[in-house]
Amino acid sequence: MIHLPCQKNAEDVFIEVEHSQICKYGERSAGDVFTSEKNQNDGRIILTLSDGLGSGVKANVLASLTATMATKCIAANIPAKHVTETIMNMLPVDSVRGISYATFTTVDIEVDGTVHIIEYDNPPYFLVRQNECIELQKEKTEFTRKNKKTAPKVKLSLCYSTYKAKVGDRLIFFSDGVTQSGIGYGNLTQGWELKNISQYIIKLIQSKHDISARELSQAIVKKACTNDLSLPKDDISCGVVYFRKPRYLLVISGPPQDKRNDKAIASIFTQFEGKKVIAGGTTSNIIARMLDKKIQACYNVSSSSEVPPYSKMEGADLVCEGIITLDSVCHILENASEKDTHTSEDAATILARLLVNSDRIYFVVGTTINVSNKANEYEEQEIRHTIIKKISYLLKNIYLKDTYIHYI
């Protein structure tokens, strides 16, 4: 019998990170860039939203350079002030407007919940706690470039702030495509001002207290786009960090090597507190037999789908085929920028959504060889393990999830 890590911990907090983005109307490349990474050495989560001057490819290159430098330097424990000064001295300056070619906001979250934020010329962030926007003390620093000839006409002003996150906190930061949306339309003569944005965010949270980081960022970006009559005048980007209790998901795939462990995987399935997925026909038949459950096939999926139809079973959120479905899930997760474009309801799309909307994901993987498969028996086993390892890697590195793989 295997034991999954404890799911119930009063102090356990998951940090959900998401962002949404819409390009300026007529552009295919966004001039805003959002980067995120989890430092493998100390577990810190580091995020950067950079806004390149203008729009299109040129702005994207400069924003990418800025975001990458900021994230990597902070990850390397270079002091924040030195990081920002280095970036500002390296970035070119617009010869006409006399301002730097990129702005940025960097968020550094330690494992104990301490949050450090650096802001340069982006709109100020919001910290929402218990349905209120909390004002934090910020240290402001001004400096000029070392090369006076290329220095901006205005002094560079940087803001530093630190606070200790609490369960339920939401940190929201965005580019000026949000604050300047709607300028010249209706009563938004000055754009969507900070006071109005904060009120909109509070109403969203009050109407749905558990709204996810993904949903909140999407709602803010969509509203800003609507302010511009769905013809955005600038790139619109929003990042959200949500400190909350974790959501759990169990994925069981493949029968156990020893048939005596059939009872063990059925017990794991029964006792797990969270959403549950069974990926594999043989696996689902074992669990259904051990628990005396019935499996009902669903044939309402388009016949043109390359993914086999899914099934239903009491106690499971999804019952699906194994290798083909998991491989398709892997493709969806790899194309992170397309994750909001999948509107079909085949098994792979449903499973990908369950994975993205969960935080602690446990894979229980059987190690027996499926003799019913026509492919080479050993290769079939290796393919399953390889795909699940890749899914786990993508979830950790692109979606910042916590994943665990247990073989049985």
Image (cartoon, grey):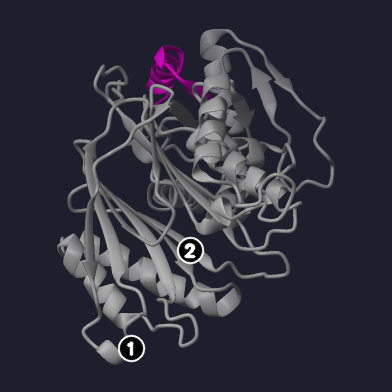
Q: Residues within 10 Å of mark 1 (few under 14, many from 20)?
A: some
Q: CA distance from mark 1 to mark 2?
A: 25 Å
Find residue 244 and report its image quarter.
top left
Range shown magenta: 258-277
Q: Nearer the viewer, mark 1 or mark 2?
A: 1
Image coordinates of residue 29 in percent, x first then y, are 61, 70
Residue shown at 58%/21% (left/top)?
Answer: 207
Label 1 element class:
helix
Q: Earlier in the sequence, mark 1 or mark 2?
A: 2
Q: Which of the two residues, 306 or 98, is positioned nearer the viewer here?
A: 98
Total number of numbered labels?
2
Residue shown at 81% from the left, 30% from the top: 299
Is residue 346 rendered to the left or right of residue 203?
right
Query: Which residue corresponds to mark 1?
Result: 150
For mark 2, what is the residue?
A: 33
* Residue 267 painted magenta: yes
Q: Position of residue 330 (x, y in %)?
A: 54, 51
- Whether residue 238 appears in magenta in the rendering, the answer is no
User: Which residue is painted at 51% across and 49% down in the image?
Assistant: 238
Q: Amino acid at mark 1?
A: Thr
Residue 344 as seen in the image, left or right of residue 209: right
Residue 26's x, y, as percent?
Answer: 73, 69
Position of 212 relative to 60 (above/below):
above
| Residue situated in front as seen by the camera: 307 or 339 | 339
